[in-house]
Image (cartoon, helix red, strand yellow):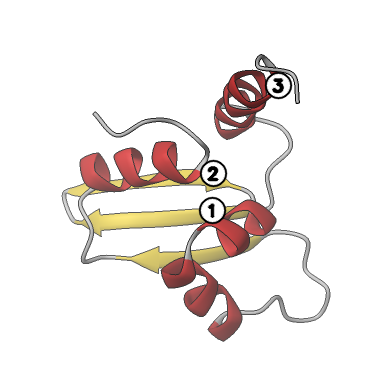
Amino acid sequence: MDDKLLPKLSQNLLEILNDDEYYDIKIEVGNDPYVKVFRAHMVILHYRSPYLRRILSINKKKNDVTLSFIKLPNISPEIFQIILRYIYGGKLL
């Protein structure tokens, strides 16, 4: 296997995380006044995080809605941003 493939794939996934156009879920984290909404991709969350897979299975899309929304009030925005970067192939800080 090409030694450059996996680092490039990891970089591409992080670029997808920052994409403002092609996402299918919004995740609201934190409590007022520290609330932030993240955009993500259900298929990546499903396969990379057993915790989020369970949440997504509970909150399945209804009526073929193309965009899903979940709330995770018990996670701070700063921590969730680190978690998302890890899920998308980044390294933990």
> What residue lies at 71% left-to-right and 32% top-to-bottom?
21
Eyeballing the image, is 15 above or below 50? above
C-alpha gap between disc 3 and disc 2? 25 Å
In the displayed orientation, state which residue is furthest to the right. Answer: 64
User: Disc 2, disc 1: CB below 8 Å?
Assistant: yes
Which residue: 81% across, 80% down?
Answer: 63
Q: Position of residue 31 (x, y in %)?
A: 19, 59
Q: CA distance from mark 3 to mark 1?
A: 29 Å
Left/right placement of residue 87 relative to residue 6 reads left
Name which residue type carries label 1.
Lys
In the rendered image, which quarter is residue 57 located in? bottom right
Which sits earlier in the primary sequence, circle 3 or circle 2?
3
| Residue 7 position (above or below residue 76) | above
Q: Is residue 9 above or below residue 80?
A: above
Q: Nearer the viewer, residue 11 or 64?
A: 11
Q: Say whether residue 86 is left or right of residue 76.
A: right
Q: Which residue position holds label 3? A: 5
Q: Which residue is mark 1?
A: 26
Mark 1 packing: few (<14 Cα in 10 Å), some, or many (20+)? some
Res. 39 mark = 2
Residue at 63%, 52% (x, y): give it. 44
Of mark 2 and mark 1, the one earlier in the sequence is: 1
Q: Nearer the viewer, residue 68 or 87?
A: 87
Task: Identify which amino acid the numbered label 3 is placed on.
Answer: Leu
The circle drawn on residue 67 is none
Instruction: Indicate which label's residue lies in the foreground, 3 or 2.
Output: 3
Left/right placement of residue 37 relative to residue 36 reads right
